[in-house]
Amino acid sequence: MPFRQALQGFIDKAEKSWDELNNRSPQPAQSYNRPPPPPIPTSTKPSSGYQEQPPQIYWQPNLHPQAPVSANFYHEQGQHGWGNNESQNYIDSPQNSFHSAQGDAVIVRALINHGHPDHAQKFTSARLSSHQTLSRPRGYPFKWPEDGEVDIMEAWNGDAVNHTCLHWGHFNGQDWNKHRVLETPIPNISSPVGVKYDFIWDEDESTGRGRLVWLIDGVPIMRAEKPPGTRKMSEFRILINIAVGGNVCQGNLPSDGCYETVVRELAMWDAPPGGWREFDRAWMNARDGKTM
């Protein structure tokens, strides 16, 4: 039986100099008194006569500066190319992943030092995988690639372009029709205000069929039908990372310095803003993704 949810968040992608990193002084921590998140609702889809309630958050990470990142995310670690000949070493370090001093963001940082004598320390970064799954077949925020991959925010080589993607096949001729992608210019990608990225899914778990919609700053960007045979949406997790180099970037490596992705207002909702009628409208206004 289907029911509904959504995923929201602001992402502010910024670059900071190596000197700024070294000269940054720690901020005083505030007292830790943030209440726990509300319990996840378990009700099924209401009857047709039910008056739809305003959207509610069912998961939001605790970003207090004294709370460890590991309370919300698992650190995936390693320097083995990650299937894309990437150069970074994903590690569990407070230098590469931490909460903001204001308690309003989780920050992932890549530190680049070409001259470091230890190869494992030349390109360090973080790859965070949420403990919390999407939890339900409908909402508003595996074995790869058959289980499926949803890219909400992805940018390459510092370009101000977002690559909205859905993958459930390999990058070869045989799987050419198992990809949906669209490129969207993001001129304000480095703005302190940030860019708002939304993803809405609606799946009937009894059939595995469903609809997916991506939005940027509230504008529907791409839509796609959920591919048959892919993993249930309720089993997906949120992944936040900064990769370095790799095939998709033609092997280009950044200069020495500090590169950050700042994620604010990350949350999972039981419905998109405006309710599920707005989802139908977003579906009508979004474009179909292109094949690769």
Image (tube, rainbow, N blue to C red):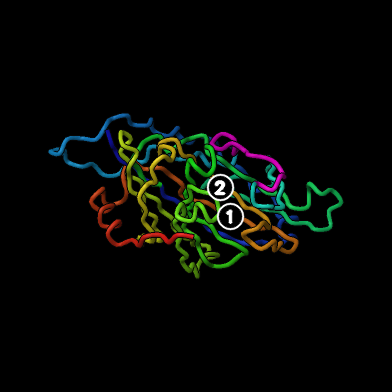
Identify the residue at image location x=28%, y=52%: 279
Amino acid at pointer 2: Ile
- The image shows residue 158, relative to residue 213, as above or below, that is below
- Whether the residues at callouts 2 and 1 have beta carbons within 8 Å, the answer is yes
Which mark identifies residue 42?
Answer: none
Let me know if residue 74 is in the magenta part. yes
Q: What separation in Å lies between label 2 and label 1 (alpha carbons)? A: 9 Å
Q: Callout 2: helix, strand or loop?
A: strand
Circle 1: residue type: Thr
Pointer 2 residue: 240
Image coordinates for residue 8, horizontal then vertical, percent: 41, 49
Furthest residue in direction right, as rendered = 117
Q: Determine which of the numbered discs, if any, sits on residue 261 in the image.
A: 1
* Residue located 69% across and 48% down the image: 81
Give the x, y percent position of residue 1: 27, 33
Stretch of the chain drawn in magenta? 69-82
Q: Quadrant of residue 53?
A: top left
Among the 4 quarters of the image, the one containing residue 16: bottom right
Residue 61 x/y as whole percent: 49, 39
